Image (spheres, grey):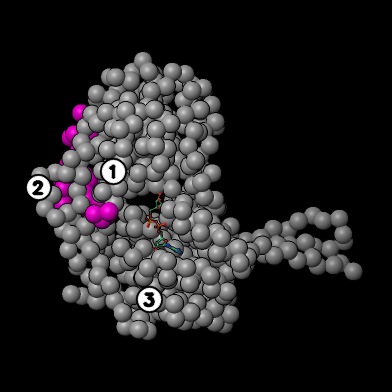
């Protein structure tokens, strides 16, 4: 089996102890790569190197335009290797190949955006009362620890690495242990694009050990984490010890609010993908569909029928729309929630079975739960699998109340032809990212992040520059 070594300062190398672990192909339930497993000493090495490189200035003091050029070159290289990266991502994360291609394209867009943005991150002049000139500088924060989950490995790594590098930081990346391959490949691409040595390290390994050591390291200036709310909360606690800057993108339980004046057919076609895309393993998954009572039965029937048409299949099959879950454990979790929902009084109106031709893969037919009350655990907890809850509401006020009645606040959608209502509801929903008459709420150019227990800080768009820069204020006296 091929061995993927870790990346230390841009160079591929074995871990200090020489340990490796197996990466599984979830559609097959079989290992297809061996990956170097980092340990606490590797973390210390990588952070020390990132710190020295930052201080020495080969990247942090390079002109912003020159930094941008490296990122633009990386975008070109990602596009040139799109198919190769897409196949790697599809096999490792179990994604349909068509989705994997889109995601690699998105990663290229993100590097292109930040390549162009690098020399447009600047401070201000401020009219103060004292005689002189007050200016602010936007400076890189230093070593950034970037920790990513397994559901969108390359995309989320790009959301963090591109702005952190554009701002002049050095980075140590900890990809999810289940899906480290495309992040390792991305580091190679960045080196080929001209990133100086020492600027990037990628350390695969267990979160509790490698992630913990990274977050706790005193030379790490900033932690950017995407993952579960539980781990995010632990990370925030660890960051408190060293006053390390932290931003958190965590879980979600998004509401998809459908009023009786919506274009129901368009809504249903979009909404099946809004929840079952990536097999439901998406922090933005619209996993609670709130439907106005007058169209509830008709909507539920049509939604269930449309769900049954989704093509569940092998990631490399061009026809597949839904692949396997990431692991046997993740599938069991979804199945347990389906059983719980039924005990709570909901009914399964589509899916929920393991397809007969699943082989060893962790496949599950996308499932629709009807008759759900928003107070049920299936409606309150993030399932992170192909399960949707359809919940009735009577009025606009009730829709808003139900949408907000969850600990999370990441994303959501509103479907209505009434512009005033769309605006009122969008303003009232406590979530960071919303869409109206669309399921698209993630855009390279626009801020992305959560309210409440979905975390804080905004990635993407120019807002992300705030995560990776310090503001310095300097006063020049006229006297
Ligand atoms: P996870 O929290 O288990 O792991 C995320 C990352 O943190 C992994 O790299 C993991 O190895 C690492 N980690 C685990 N324990 C750690 C520790 N103690 N210290 C430091 N690092 C540690 O999440 P997951 O299962 O990989 O991903 C699924 C979760 O991520 C879901 O809850 C989902 O909603 C969330 N998510 C959120 C967003 C968003 O942008 N809001 C995007 C994708 C996924």
Q: Secondary structure at mark 1?
A: helix
Please say whether residue 328 is visible from this viewpoint. yes
Residue shown at 69%/65% (left/top)? Answer: 472
**Label whose residue precedes the other's in the sequence (3 or 2):** 3
Residue shown at 33%/18% (left/top)? Answer: 295
Start-end of magenta stretch: 305-329
Q: Quadrant of the C terminus?
A: bottom right
**Mark 1 CB in 8 Å range of ligand 1?**
no
Q: Residue 473 colored magenta?
A: no
Q: Residue furthest right?
A: 479
Instruction: Tell me the number on the disc at residue 357.
Output: 2
Q: Nearer the viewer, mark 2 or mark 1?
A: 1
Residue shown at 42%/55% (left/top)? Answer: 227
Q: Position of residue 51 (x, y in %)?
A: 54, 78
Quick one: label 1, few (<14), some, or many (20+) residues within 10 Å? few
Of residues 78 and 204, the one drawn nearer to the viewer in this rendering: 204
Q: Position of residue 386 (x, y in %)?
A: 28, 42
Of residues 334 and 465, the one drawn nearer to the viewer in this rendering: 334
Residue 280 occupies which quadrant of the picture?
A: top left
Q: Which residue is mark 3?
A: 38
Residue shown at 39%/73% (left/top)? Answer: 203
Does residue 400 lie above or below 460 as drawn? above
Residue 375 occupies which quadrant of the picture?
A: top left
Quick one: label 3, few (<14), some, or many (20+) residues within 10 Å? many
Q: Which residue is mark 1?
A: 336
Of residues 407 and 162, the one drawn nearer to the viewer in this rendering: 407
Q: Secondary structure at mark 2?
A: loop
């Amino acid at each position: 089996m091929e061995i993927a070594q870790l990346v230390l300062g841009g160079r591929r190398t074995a871990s200090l102890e020489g340990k490796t672990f197996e990466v599984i192909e979830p559609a097959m339930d079989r290992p297809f790569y061996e990956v170097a497993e980092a340990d606490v000493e590797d973390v210390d090495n990588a952070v020390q190197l990132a710190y020295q490189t930052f201080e020495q200035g080969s990247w942090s003091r390079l002109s912003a335009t020159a930094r941008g050029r490296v990122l633009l070159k990386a975008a070109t290289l990602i596009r040139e290797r799109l198919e190769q990266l897409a196949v790697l991502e599809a096999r490792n994360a179990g994604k349909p190949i068509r989705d994997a291609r889109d995601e690699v394209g998105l990663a290229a867009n993100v590097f292109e955006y930040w390549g162009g943005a690098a020399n447009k991150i600047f401070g201000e002049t401020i009219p103060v009362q004292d005689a002189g000139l007050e200016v602010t500088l936007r400076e890189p924060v230093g070593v950034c620890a970037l920790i990513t989950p397994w559901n969108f490995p390359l995309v989320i790594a790009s959301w963090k690495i591109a702005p952190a590098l554009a701002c002049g930081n050095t980075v140590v990346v900890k990809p999810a242990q289940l899906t480290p391959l495309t992040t390792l490949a991305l580091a190679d691409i960045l080196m080929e694009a001209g990133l100086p040595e020492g600027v990037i390290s990628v350390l695969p390994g267990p979160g509790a050990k490698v992630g913990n050591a990274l977050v706790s390291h005193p030379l790490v200036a900033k932690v950017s984490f995407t993952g579960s709310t539980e781990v995010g909360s632990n990370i925030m606690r660890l960051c408190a010890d060293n006053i390390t800057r932290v931003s958190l993108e965590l879980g979600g339980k998004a509401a998809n609010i459908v009023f009786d004046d919506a274009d129901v057919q368009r809504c249903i076609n979009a909404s099946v993908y809004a929840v079952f895309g990536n097999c439901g393993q998406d922090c933005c998954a619209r996993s609670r569909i709130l439907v106005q009572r007058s169209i509830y039965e008709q909507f539920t029937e049509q939604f269930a029928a449309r769900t049954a048409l989704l093509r569940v299949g092998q990631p490399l099959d061009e026809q597949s729309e839904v692949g396997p879950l990431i692991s046997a454990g993740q599938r069991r979790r979804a199945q347990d929630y389906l059983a719980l929902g039924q005990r709570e009084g909901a009914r399964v109106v589509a899916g929920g079975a393991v397809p007969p031709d699943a082989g060893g893969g962790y496949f599950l037919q996308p499932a629709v739960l009807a008759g759900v009350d928003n107070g049920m655990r299936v409606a309150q907890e993030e399932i992170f699998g192909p399960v949707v809850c359809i919940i009735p509401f009577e009025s606009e006020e009730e829709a808003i109340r139900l949408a907000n009645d969850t600990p999370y606040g990441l994303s959501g959608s509103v479907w209505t032809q009434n512009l005033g209502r769309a605006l009122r509801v969008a303003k009232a929903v406590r979530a960071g990212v919303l869409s109206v008459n669309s399921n698209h709420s993630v855009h390279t150019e626009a801020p992305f992040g959560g309210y409440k227990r979905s975390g804080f800080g905004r990635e993407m768009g120019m807002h992300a520059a705030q995560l990776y820069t310090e503001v310095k204020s300097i006063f020049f006296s006229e006297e």
